[in-house]
Structures are given as structure tokens and as C-alpha cells.
């Protein structure tokens, strides 16, 4: 679209949107959300009906802040007079009022009434004659016309109504069963009678005419005509979407060819990234119903598409498909997909059972078997009391010279589970993940299910945050180039975590925005987790209202999900702490701990609920429990062995302990974090250490530590933490300067994201296309970035950003 609008403004008009399918409506919504700064006018016409239940995208479209809703009012009496004058008729006020009363100002009915009056002759131009044509009859004008049609005319009009947008003269003729000569005569009479508008386009004069013709066809006859139309379109190789549109309205009749057509249309929709449309077509195929030989294929594809859209029925459909499969390899494939569908639904025990059934199948493909094994580990590792089974698998994988495609996913899942349970050490598991990622090009890795995402989950728990950001940045670039926008958004979510901990707060927010765009395309896997990171970053930037807005999620929808039960309460607890409500913080952080236990997540990163719960409890004076919780976090972090995770846990324990022992713990945290990648955690530890030193009477050292803290907070744009540091520094006797309005920390997330993209050598146009904004928006953000960074050209950007 950016290419099109370069030549001038663009108007997109969509009529009768209430008849559109949901994928098309989602596309309209996505477009409407992104054209605020683009010279594009999107006009969407909807026909409101009594008790209308709009599809969700229509509801969202109508509620957009940028949307202007126009509700056409009926014509006034004066407007009726103007319409009459435009049609060449003169009328007095009494005639105008009579026409207005008869039509209630509906422009179409006004024209129809005027036409009826003209057919009656000049003597009907007075008010009494008009009142004789009662309003109810005006509404039946089209019906009266249809009643006067000859049989060939009626059959052709009905064919046009059934075929809709797919109507052509030849198709309508064939569907009506007419020869060429009869069809041409019927077309001419329908045009002359104002039923059809144009003999070339084969279109009705007005949607009301089309609706009336369509409604006049008896239901059973209409369903049969739709079936005939579908087969006719299929015979002439019409687009499968047109064929499918007919079959949705056709009456099921057990026709194997209909099932094949629906299956083909569904496969095409799925390949276009429209699983909802595919699932709808496949459910219609089941209604046909399919022959026994076809049923397996329908159920198999339906199960996959339902899993893609997160439909609760997916697991039942998988089980039904599996019952029909005899081939061991195909059965193992389906059990693998069933297991992942169950994981997505939070049904971990059932997922373990599905993976275990797959592993019990002899003769399964080695790669499928390895992935079943990975799924088995991912769904059941905590339930295993005997850890020797996992340990044996770990030894086998680590001993292999080359993991290969069959074992890469298994390797990263092993590393993830070992990290979650803290059953291994961080350096070894990070090395295993990096080894798996180094074995294949990124173009291959992004196709291997959740390999990249799971690997990112391990790396963020280790001291490899910088490597993780660099790797995910390259993965996002590959995903964008290959059109895998859902994957790009998912990887952006993964990158938001290391960006957050490294103090790149604006980058973290920008990443979560890309993740939300992926959710609009149906990739909602990490939506609550992305909202969590966005909220945490906003809290650090002092943007508490923005944090609350990010967490405005549907609790009933997401609380059963692991991230909804574990991460979202963590962010809500942090927000409560930022607002000074320790009691609410304790409640939310306890919920986060319960969610973590349900997810079998023992590690302190990124679910650092223990640190914040300990601090919240200490604020409430519950020191004993606060110490127990905080020191449990330290013990877990020491066991895992990541330096920055341990430094973060020690920082919280130092705050809870207070006094000389607290200062000792905070000094240890400073030592661990000083040269590490987690700069936000280091800034936090410095502020807390400086505050503890000031309270202990060591004002000179406190000023030195707090000065370091304030400088670091300024670099990171951590404004909330900066305000604390400045207040402590002032209390220690210094006179600190306030936050400057220049530098990297002053950039908004959008400005920083555009600036970083500009350092890659991309043009403004390429940046706009990658980020789904306009070139003008890119220019605007770059101009602001130059001003805040106090530079004058793109070539100075890399150095300015590094200096920040």
C-alpha cells in the first residue's frame, strides 16, 4: 500500500461488510489500525439489522478511536422535494409530504414510488393519489416486479442472485439451464425492468433487489442451486474460494466430490495463513458427510487448523482422526501434533500421554521420534520422580558429535527443562543451546517448530543475554524476509526479555508492540507474556498508566494459561508496588508464585516473584517470611549458576535483610552484576546499596555509589529508578542534576526502534515496510532522534546509540 499511495491519496470502499468472512474482516481491522498517518481513506458500509450480532472484527473496527461513524438519516421532506426536482418532477408541499410519509425518507423507496406514479400517468401527481399507494406496498415494489417475470427471466435472475460476485453471463445461463438466445433475451428484459443494472456486468440494480430475488427462492431450491453453482464453478476452474462460498450454502448430500472440493479449498486457505476459514470449510465437509475413505483426511486437516487457532475442539478432533489411522508413521505424526495442541491448552498430563503413545509406536521416523521425546520431556518432566531417565537422555544428547535435525529440538527442550527445574548448571545448558543453534542456518532453524523460542527461554536465564539479542535480531530479519510475520512477532517477544533486563527499555516496549501485531494475525501464543514485559518496561520508565493499560487483559480468557497465571500477576504485583500498595502487591505476587509452581518453574529468571514478594512482605513488616522467601531465591540462583540471576536475587535479599548484613549482600550483588549484561539489575542494586549505605551513616561512600547509579539510570532511561536514586543522592548531601531531555534515554520506543533500524543501512522506505509504518512516520521519528541525540545525520547514529 505504501507503494500505491506514493502516487496520490487512495480510497478503499467496502460495501456490505456484514456479509464478509471473518479473515477478510480481520484484514480490514488490521488495515484500519495502521493508516492514521497514511493518505488512505477506508470506507466500510454495514447494513444494520434488528438485533444484529456483529462479528468481533466489526465490533473492534467500529470502536477504533480513529473511526468516524456515519449513520445516514432518512431524507427530510425538503430533501424529498430536491430529489423530485432532480428527477424532473415538480410537486407542491402536500405531494412532497405524502411521498415522505409513504417512504419515510428512504431514497430508494422514493425513487420507486416516483416510478410507480409515472407508470400511473399524470393524474396521480396529487397527494390523495399518492396516499392511495400505501407505504407497505412501496416496500413490495421489487416483489411485484418479480411476480411479473417470465419463467426464463426469473430463472436467470435467480441464477444471478445465487452466483453473486461470481456471476457472469455464461455461468448464469448454464445455471439457469438456458440456451444463449433465451439468456440474452431474458437479460435484456431484466435490464429494461430495472432488475439488472447492466447486461455486461450481470449485476442487480440495487442490493435490495438482490436480497429480494434471493429471498424469493424457496429454501430447499436455493440450497440445491448453490450446490449446482459450486459444481459449475469447479468445472470451469473458478477460484476455490468462489466454489467454497457456494458450498457453504449448499445442502449436505453425501457427495464425495463436494468433500474433495471443500478439502481443497480448506488446504488453500490454510496455506494462505487463514486457519479459521479452513476450519469452517472442513466442518462443512464433515456435515456432507465424507465417505469413510475421505473422513480421515478431513479430520486430520481440521485438527491441525483447529490447533492453529486454539480451538478447544482440536484435541477431540485429533483423537477422532487418530482412531482412523492405521499407518504407524502417520499415527505418530498426529500424536505429536495432538501433544502440542494439548500443551497450548494447558493440558500437560494429557499431552504427556499423547507423546508417550507416540513413542510407543514402532517404526516411527527418527526425527518424529526425537520430537515426540522432546514433547514428552516438555510436558512431564516434573511428574517424573525418577530423574535417571532425564539424566540418561541428557548424557546421550551431550555425547553426540552432531545433534542433527532429529535431536536439536530435543536438546533445547532438555536444556529448558533442566533450567526450569534447576537440575543442571546455567553455563552447560547455555552451551548446549548455542551448539544446537550453530548446527543449521537460521532459515532452517525457524522452520523447526518452537526450537528458536525454547532456546531463547534458556538463554535469558543464563549470562548470554547479549548473544541472545544478536541471534534473535537475525532471526527476526530472516522471518520478515520470508514472510513469516507471526514468527517475527514471536521472536520479537522473546527478544523483549533480554532487552528489558539489559536496560534497553524502549527496545523492549517496541518488541512487545511487534508481538501484539503478530497476535492480530492469530499468533497469540505469547500475548500475556508480551503484555507482562511491556508493563515491566513501562514501570521502569515511570509510565504507570501505560503499564496498567498493557495489563488490561481478559482474565477469564488467559488465567488458565501458564503465562497468564504466572507472569501477568508478577507484573500486576510490580505495578502495585510502584503505586505504594504493598498489600495488593503481596496478593498478586503470591498468585505469581502459585502460577510458577503450577508451571513447575523453579528458576528465578524471568519469574523473579520471590525477590519482589520478599520486598513487599518487608514493607508490610513481615520480616521473617520476607527473609525466607528472598533467601530461597538466592539458594535457587546459586544452584543454577548464572551470575546476573544470582546478583538480582542477592540484591532483593540485601534489601529485605537491611543493616550490615544487608549491605554485605548488596555489595556481592554489585560485584556480580558490574561487568555483566543485566544493566537494569545492576542499576537497581546500586540504588539499593547506596540507600543502605546512607541509612548506615556512610554518606561519602553512599554518594559515590549513588552517583554511579544515577549515571547508569540516565543511560537506560529507567526514570522511576532514577527518581529514587536522585532522591537518595540528595538525602546523602549531594546536589544532583535532573534528567536531561537529550540522549538515548530520552528517545521514545518508536524513535529508538526506527533509529536502530536506520543503522542497518536500510532506506526509510525499507524501514517503513519492515515496521508497518509510513515513510513519513520514519522521517518524523528520525528527525526527533537526531534532535535528542544532538546529531545531524544518519551516519552519526551508530556512535550516538553506542554512547547511550
Image: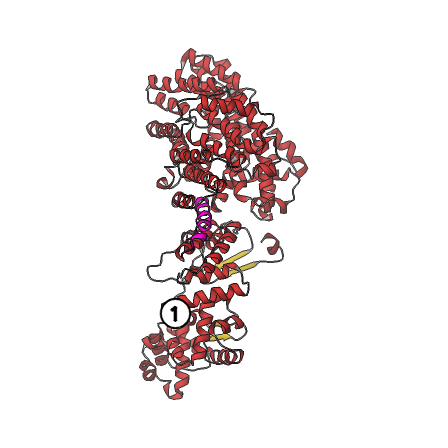
Instruction: Provide the secondary structure element on which disc 1 rests.
Output: helix
Res 798 quadrant in image = top right
Q: Which residue bears the numbered disc 1?
A: 221
- Farthest residue to the top: give it: 660
Q: Is residue 711 visible?
A: no
Image location of residue 258, percent across then percent down: 46, 60
- Please say if 657 is above or below 542: above
The foreground one among 268 and 213 is: 268
- Provide the major secondary structure of the magenta segment: helix
The image shows a total of numbered marks equal to 1
What are the residue bounds of the magenta stretch? 289-311
- Farthest residue to the right: give it: 795
> Could you tell whether 4 is left or right of 659 in the image?
right
Image location of residue 95, percent across then percent down: 36, 80
> Could you tell whether 345 is left or right of 438 in the image?
left
Magenta stretch contains residue 308:
yes
- Please say if 216 is above or below 268: below
Magenta stretch contains residue 439:
no
The foreground one among 623 and 310 is: 310
> Could you tell whether 482 is left or right of 381 in the image?
right
Q: How is the image coloured?
A: secondary structure
The foreground one among 564 and 5 is: 564
Image location of residue 359, percent across then percent down: 46, 33
Q: Is residue 776 visible?
A: yes
Q: Quadrant of the C terminus?
A: top right
Q: Residue at x 48, y 31 (%)?
A: 373
Image location of residue 582, percent across then percent down: 35, 27
Near mark 1 (Cα within 10 A), the count class, few <14, some 14-19 or many ≥20, is few
Res 355 quadrant in image = top left
Q: Quadrant of the N terminus?
A: bottom right
- Please say if 371 is above or below 3: above
Amino acid at each position: 500500500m505504501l507503494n500505491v499511495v506514493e502516487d496520490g491519496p487512495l480510497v478503499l470502499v467496502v460495501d456490505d461488510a456484514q456479509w464478509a468472512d471473518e479473515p477478510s474482516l480481520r484484514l480490514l481491522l488490521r488495515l484500519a489500525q495502521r493508516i492514521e498517518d497514511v493518505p488512505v481513506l477506508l470506507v466500510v458500509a454495514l447494513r444494520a439489522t434488528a438485533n444484529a450480532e456483529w462479528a468481533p472484527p466489526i465490533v473492534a473496527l467500529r470502536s477504533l478511536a480513529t473511526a468516524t461513524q456515519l449513520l445516514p438519516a432518512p431524507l427530510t421532506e425538503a430533501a424529498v422535494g430536491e430529489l423530485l426536482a432532480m428527477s424532473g418532477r415538480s410537486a407542491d408541499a402536500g405531494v412532497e409530504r405524502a411521498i415522505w410519509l409513504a417512504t419515510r425518507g428512504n431514497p430508494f423507496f422514493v425513487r420507486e414510488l416516483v416510478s410507480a406514479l409515472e407508470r400511473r400517468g399524470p393524474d396521480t401527481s396529487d397527494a390523495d393519489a399518492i396516499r392511495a399507494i400505501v407505504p407497505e406496498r412501496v416496500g413490495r415494489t421489487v416483489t411485484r416486479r418479480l411476480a411479473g417475470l417470465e419463467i426464463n427471466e426469473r430463472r436467470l435472475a435467480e441464477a444471478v442472485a445465487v452466483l453473486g460476485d461470481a456471476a457472469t453471463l455464461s455461468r448464469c445461463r448454464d445455471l439457469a439451464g438456458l440456451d444463449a438466445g433465451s439468456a440474452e433475451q431474458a437479460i435484456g428484459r431484466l435490464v429494461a425492468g430495472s432488475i439488472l443494472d447492466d447486461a455486461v456486468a450481470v449485476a442487480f440494480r440495487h442490493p435490495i433487489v438482490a436480497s429480494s430475488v434471493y429471498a424469493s427462492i424457496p429454501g430447499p431450491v436455493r440450497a440445491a442451486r448453490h450446490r449446482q453453482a459450486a459444481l459449475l464453478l469447479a468445472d470451469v476452474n473458478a477460484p476455490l474460494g468462489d466454489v467454497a462460498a457456494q458450498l457453504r450454502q449448499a445442502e449436505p448430500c453425501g457427495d464425495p466430490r463436494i468433500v474433495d472440493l471443500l478439502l481443497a479449498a480448506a488446504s488453500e486457505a490454510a496455506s494462505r495463513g487463514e486457519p479459521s476459514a479452513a476450519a469452517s470449510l472442513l466442518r462443512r465437509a464433515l456435515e456432507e458427510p465424507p465417505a469413510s475413505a475421505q473422513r480421515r483426511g478431513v479430520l486430520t486437516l481440521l485438527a491441525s487448523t483447529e490447533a492453529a487457532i486454539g480451538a478447544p475442539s482440536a484435541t477431540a478432533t485429533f483423537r477422532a482422526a487418530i482412531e482412523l489411522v492405521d499407518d504407524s508413521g502417520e499415527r505418530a505424526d498426529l500424536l505429536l501434533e495432538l501433544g502440542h495442541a494439548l500443551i497450548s491448552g494447558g493440558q500437560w498430563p494429557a499431552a504427556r500421554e499423547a507423546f508417550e503413545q507416540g513413542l510407543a509406536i514402532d517404526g516411527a521416523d527418527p526425527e518424529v521420534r526425537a520430537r515426540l521425546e522432546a514433547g514428552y520431556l516438555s510436558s512431564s518432566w516434573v511428574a517424573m520422580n525418577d530423574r535417571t531417565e532425564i539424566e540418561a537422555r541428557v548424557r546421550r544428547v551431550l555425547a553426540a558429535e552432531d545433534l542433527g535435525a532429529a535431536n536439536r529440538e530435543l536438546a533445547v527442550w532438555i536444556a529448558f527443562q533442566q533450567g526450569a527445574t534447576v537440575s543442571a548448571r546455567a553455563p552447560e545448558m547455555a552451551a548446549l543451546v548455542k551448539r544446537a543453534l550453530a548446527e543449521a542456518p537460521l532459515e532452517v532453524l525457524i522452520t523447526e517448530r518452537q526450537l528458536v523460542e525454547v532456546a531463547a527461554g534458556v538463554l535469558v536465564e543464563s549470562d548470554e543475554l547479549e548473544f541472545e539479542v544478536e541471534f534473535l535480531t537475525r532471526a527476526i530479519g530472516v522471518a520478515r524476509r520470508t514472510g513469516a510475520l507471526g514468527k517475527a512477532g514471536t521472536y520479537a517477544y522473546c527478544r523483549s526479555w533480554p532487552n528489558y533486563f539489559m536496560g534497553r527499555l524502549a527496545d523492549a516496549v517496541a518488541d512487545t508492540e511487534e508481538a501484539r501485531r503478530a497476535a492480530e494475525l492469530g499468533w497469540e501464543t505469547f500475548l500475556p507474556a508480551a503484555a507482562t514485559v511491556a508493563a515491566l518496561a513501562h514501570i521502569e520508565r515511570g509510565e504507570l498508566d501505560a503499564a496498567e493499560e498493557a495489563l488490561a487483559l481478559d482474565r477469564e480468557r488467559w488465567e488458565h494459561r501458564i503465562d497468564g497465571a504466572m507472569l501477568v500477576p508478577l507484573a500486576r504485583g510490580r505495578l502495585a508496588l510502584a503505586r505504594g500498595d504493598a498489600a495488593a502487591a503481596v496478593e498478586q505476587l503470591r498468585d505469581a508464585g502459585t502460577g510458577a509452581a503450577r508451571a513447575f518453574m523453579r528458576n528465578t529468571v524471568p519469574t523473579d516473584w520471590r525477590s519482589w514478594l520478599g520486598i513487599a512482605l518487608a514493607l508490610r513488616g513481615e520480616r521473617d517470611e520476607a527473609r525466607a522467601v528472598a533467601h530461597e531465591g538466592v539458594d535457587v540462583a546459586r544452584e543454577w549458576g548464572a551470575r546476573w540471576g544470582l546478583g538480582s536475587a542477592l540484591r532483593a535479599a540485601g534489601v529485605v535483610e537491611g543493616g550490615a548484613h544487608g549491605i554485605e549482600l548488596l555489595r556481592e550483588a554489585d560485584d556480580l552484576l558490574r561487568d555483566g549484561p543485566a544493566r537494569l539489575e545492576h542499576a537497581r542494586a546500586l540504588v539499593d546499596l547506596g540507600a543502605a549505605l546512607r541509612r548506615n551513616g556512610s554518606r561519602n561512600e553512599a554518594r559515590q555509589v549513588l552517583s554511579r547509579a544515577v549515571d547508569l539510570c540516565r543511560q537506560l532511561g529507567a526514570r522511576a529508578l532514577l527518581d529514587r536514586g536522585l532522591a537518595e543522592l540528595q538525602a546523602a548531601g549531594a546536589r544532583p542534576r535532573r534528567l536531561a531531555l537529550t540522549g538515548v534515554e530520552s528517545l521514545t520506543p518508536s524513535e529508538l526502534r526506527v533509529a536502530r533500524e536506520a543503522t542497518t543501512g536500510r532506506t526509510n522506505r525499507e524501514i517503513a515496510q519492515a515496521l508497518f509504518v509510513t515513510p513519513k512516520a520514519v522521517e518524523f521519528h528520525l528527525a526527533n532522534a537526531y534532535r535528542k541525540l544532538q546529531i545531524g545525520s544518519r551516519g552519526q547514529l551508530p556512535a550516538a546509540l553506542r554512547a547511550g
